[in-house]
Image (spheres, rainbow, N blue to C red):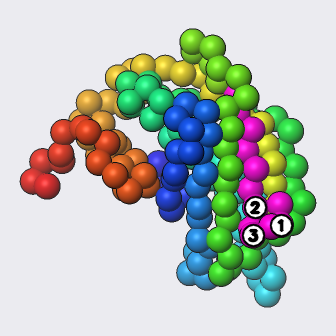
């Protein structure tokens, strides 16, 4: 991922539920154009934050042996704006999962105010088929930073 729309992830029930947070900062580039004089976090970034949190939850359930590839966005609904200075909380719940497919419900809130809800579907694939070997350690290390813990994988060279 080049853009991270999650700052921290907490798995509240492994393989079933997680919460994630994103502090929205004034320095983010998209506020210059979205919208001048009325800065609003684009809805697509809110959905992407929920997708990133869900993908991490699904990957963590297999101890990173699997990769969750988002394949569909359904029923996205937006009910309020997210502005700079606010903290978005994503609540992710696995609605259904079979061997190679999963569907989750994501709800985004700022405090007590719901801002969005979405249903996302993922195909579950072996990690080795999705992340080339030279990039795997960095990818897993980055996820470890989001979870604030060591994910039990080999350290990065020179770390």
Residue 29 appears in which quarter of the rendering? bottom right
Circle 3 SS class: loop
Whole-number angstrom distance, CA of label 3 to CA of label 2: 6 Å
Label 1 with label 3: CB-CB less than 8 Å: yes
Is the residue marked by circle 2 packed among few (<14), some (14-19), or many (20+) residues within 10 Å? many
Label 2 with label 1: CB-CB less than 8 Å: yes
Where does label 1 land, which residue? 113
Q: Position of residue 27 (x, y in %)?
A: 56, 81
Circle 1 SS class: strand
Where does label 2 land, which residue? 109
Residue 109 appears in which quarter of the rendering? bottom right
Q: Position of residue 49 (x, y in %)?
A: 62, 53
Q: Position of residue 84 (x, y in %)?
A: 68, 79
Instruction: Name the residue rendered at 83%, 60% in the picture.
Output: 114
Residue 142 can be seen, yes or no = no
**79 lies above or below 107:** below
Q: Position of residue 18 (x, y in %)?
A: 59, 45
Instruction: Name the residue rendered at 68%, 38% in the picture.
Output: 93
In the foreground, 109 or 80: 109
Residue 111 image label: 3
Q: Which residues are magenta?
A: 103-114
Label 3 with label 2: CB-CB less than 8 Å: yes
Circle 2 SS class: strand
Whole-number angstrom distance, CA of label 2 to CA of label 1: 5 Å
What's the magenta bit mostly, secondary-structure-wise?
strand
Whole-number angstrom distance, CA of label 1 to CA of label 3: 6 Å
Instruction: Name the residue rendered at 57%, 12% in the picture.
Output: 99
Q: Is residue 111 magenta?
A: yes
């Amino acid at each position: 991922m080049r853009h991270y729309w999650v700052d921290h992830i907490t798995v509240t029930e492994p393989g079933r539920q997680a919460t994630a947070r994103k502090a929205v900062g004034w320095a983010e580039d998209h506020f210059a154009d979205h919208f001048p004089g009325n800065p609003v976090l684009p809805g697509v970034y809110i959905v992407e934050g929920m997708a990133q949190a869900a993908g991490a939850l699904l990957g963590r359930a297999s101890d990173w042996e699997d990769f969750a590839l988002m394949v569909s966005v359904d029923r996205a609904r937006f009910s309020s704006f997210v502005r700079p200075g606010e903290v978005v909380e994503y609540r992710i719940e696995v609605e259904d999962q079979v061997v190679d497919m999963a569907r989750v419900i994501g709800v985004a809130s700022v405090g007590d105010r719901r801002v969005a809800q979405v249903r996302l579907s993922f195909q579950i694939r072996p990690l080795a088929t999705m992340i080339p070997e030279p990039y795997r350690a960095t990818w897993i290390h980055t996820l470890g930073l989001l979870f604030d813990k060591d994910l039990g994988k080999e350290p990065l060279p020179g770390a």
